[in-house]
């Protein structure tokens, strides 16, 4: 009887200890990106980002479950700070709507957090996108926010 009691208590303790342990994946911050396009909320479900050291460019590429419904954010650098879209190399593109059509964009990308150890960035953005297929059409992108976007680093050596 004493053996059964000790085994039962041991089993209960083991179950409590293992059930309280968090899964390693639960500790990874979840990426997110959303923006209002002409006032309508748009949210990404697929995320990919790369930083290339040769040209100091951070590229964030996101999409919905439809791969033709994509958004691309690019900055010269990945440090905290404001990246005006009027500066060469900083851009936002949604499908055929781009911030860099005439390099006179009043939009910006702000990196609010840059974790260079874990390669994660967060920030905000806004811009007016001109349709490159019909320059008389535009869309307004407001309240853009990206969080916990993990990027890979690419080292390109010039020989």
Image (cartoon, helix red, strand yellow):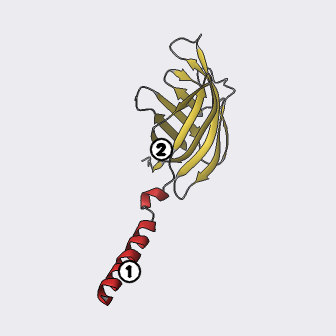
Residue at (47, 44) in percent of width and height: 50
Q: Is residue 53 at all visible to an observer of this figure?
A: no
Mark 2, residues whose alpha carbon is within 10 Å: few (<14), some, or many (≥20)? some
Sequence-wise, the earlier of marks 2 and 1 is: 1
Looking at the figure, which quarter contains the N terminus?
bottom left
Provide the residue designation for mark 2.
50
Q: Is residue 13 above or below residue 48?
A: below
Q: Nearer the viewer, residue 72 or 104?
A: 72
In x, y percent, where is residue 123? 62, 43
Provide the residue designation for mark 1.
9
In x, y percent, where is residue 71? 50, 31
In screen coordinates, is 109 left or right of 59? right
Residue at (60, 34) in percent of width and height: 90
Q: Quadrant of residue 87?
A: top right
Q: Nearer the viewer, residue 54 or 72?
A: 72
Mark 1, residues whose alpha carbon is within 10 Å: few (<14), some, or many (≥20)? few
Check disc 1 and report its element: helix, strand or loop.
helix
Count of numbered circles on the image: 2
Q: Is residue 57 above or below residue 16?
A: above
Residue at (53, 27) in percent of width and height: 93
């Amino acid at each position: 009887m004493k053996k059964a009691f000790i085994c039962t208590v041991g089993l209960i303790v083991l179950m409590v200890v293992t059930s309280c342990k968090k899964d390693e994946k639960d500790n990874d911050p979840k990426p997110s990106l959303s923006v209002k396009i002409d006032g309508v909320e748009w949210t990404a479900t697929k995320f990919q980002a790369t930083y290339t050291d040769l040209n100091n460019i951070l590229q964030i590429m996101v999409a919905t479950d439809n791969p033709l419904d994509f958004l691309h954010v690019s900055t010269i650098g990945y440090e905290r700070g404001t990246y005006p879209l009027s500066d060469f190399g900083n851009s936002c593109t949604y499908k055929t709507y781009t911030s860099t059509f005439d390099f006179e964009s009043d939009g910006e990308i702000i990196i609010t957090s840059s974790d260079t150890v874990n390669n994660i960035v967060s920030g905000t953005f806004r811009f007016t996108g001109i349709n490159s297929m019909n320059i008389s059409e535009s869309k307004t992108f407001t309240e853009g926010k990206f969080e916990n976007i993990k990027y890979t680093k690419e080292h390109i050596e010039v020989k």
